[in-house]
Amino acid sequence: MFGKFITLEGIDGAGKSTHLGWLQDWLRQRAIEHVITREPGGTPLGEKLRELLLHHDMHLETETLLMFAGRREHIAEVILPALQAGSWVVSDRFTDATFAYQGGGRGLGIERIEVLEHWVQSGLQPDLTLLFDVPLEVSRERLAKTRVLDRFEQEQQDFHQRVRNCYLERARRDPARIKVIDSTRPIEIIQQELATLLQELI
Ligand code: TMP
């Protein structure tokens, strides 16, 4: 028996965290075993890497490799064991974020990321990716309320625009897996759409 693997994505300030709580309630109400986790992070080692990744300057290649180092640990220690036990796994970000942030935002391109993806994931892909999408102005407004901005949140507008474009391009190429959720709409409407998408997975 294999559980379902769901990932949440979007530019910083797209409202992912708000919907993660709702998603957890949805799973609880249906008594679906689940694990909520995140990247970077998700394991003790991954959380240490997260601290470095969010606050320590480094070369782009180092940043990309550390994202995948943490991911390997996350897959081996958390994601695969849970899925194999029949539990659902909901991860706040996964590899689409590396394509969008390192590949698009920072300009690494996709080839080397695809090599790492192949190596580290051995074919593991999310069953469903919810891409929360808002225009840059909306995300900027939301981020303005954040106290301490990390290395990614501190980046300029054009960086975030490239990240957003890259996410949307990936969704265009893989519409069966990546669902674009217009996050500018009222929260109840968004939740209705999420419920429909989740129901299809059961
Ligand atoms: P979070 O604030 O959504 O927890 O994500 C932390 C930051 O890490 C976010 O700005 C996006 C960034 N990130 C990458 O740049 N590459 C990745 O592969 C992942 C998983 C996150």
Image (cartoon, rainbow, N blue to C red):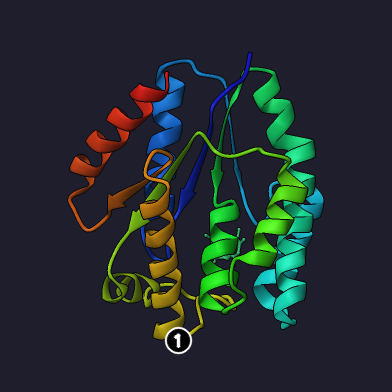
Amino acid at circle 1: Gln
Task: State the residue in front, 112 or 196.
Answer: 112
- Does residue 44 lie above or below 154 as drawn? above
Q: Quadrant of ligand 1?
A: bottom right
Quadrant placement of the C terminus: top left
- Does residue 117 lie above or below 198 as drawn? below
Q: At x 38% / y 76%, what residue is drawn?
A: 161
- Does residue 45 lie above or below 100 as drawn? above
Q: Position of residue 126 (x, y in %)?
A: 55, 38
Q: Would you say residue 43 is visible in this rendering? A: no
Q: Position of residue 70 (x, y in %)?
A: 76, 54
Q: Position of residue 10 (x, y in %)?
A: 42, 59
Task: State the residue in front, 105 or 192.
Answer: 105
Q: How many other residues sit within 10 Å of disc 1, few (<14), some (14-19) or many (≥20)? A: few
Q: Position of residue 100 (x, y in %)?
A: 51, 65
Q: At x 65% / y 71%, what residue is drawn?
A: 54
- Does residue 85 lie above or below 65 as drawn? above
Q: Is residue 65 left or right of residue 187?
A: right
Check disc 1 and report its element: helix, strand or loop.
loop
The quadrant in which residue 199 appears is: top left
The quadrant in which residue 26 appears is: top left
Q: Mark 1 sits on what residue? A: 156
Q: Would you say residue 69 is visible in this rendering? A: yes
Quadrant placement of the N terminus: top right
Q: At x 50% / y 33%, what residue is drawn?
A: 127
The quadrant in which residue 144 appears is: bottom left
Q: Is residue 189 left or right of residue 163?
A: left
Task: State the residue in front, 133 or 32.
Answer: 133
Q: Is residue 109 left or right of residue 64?
A: left
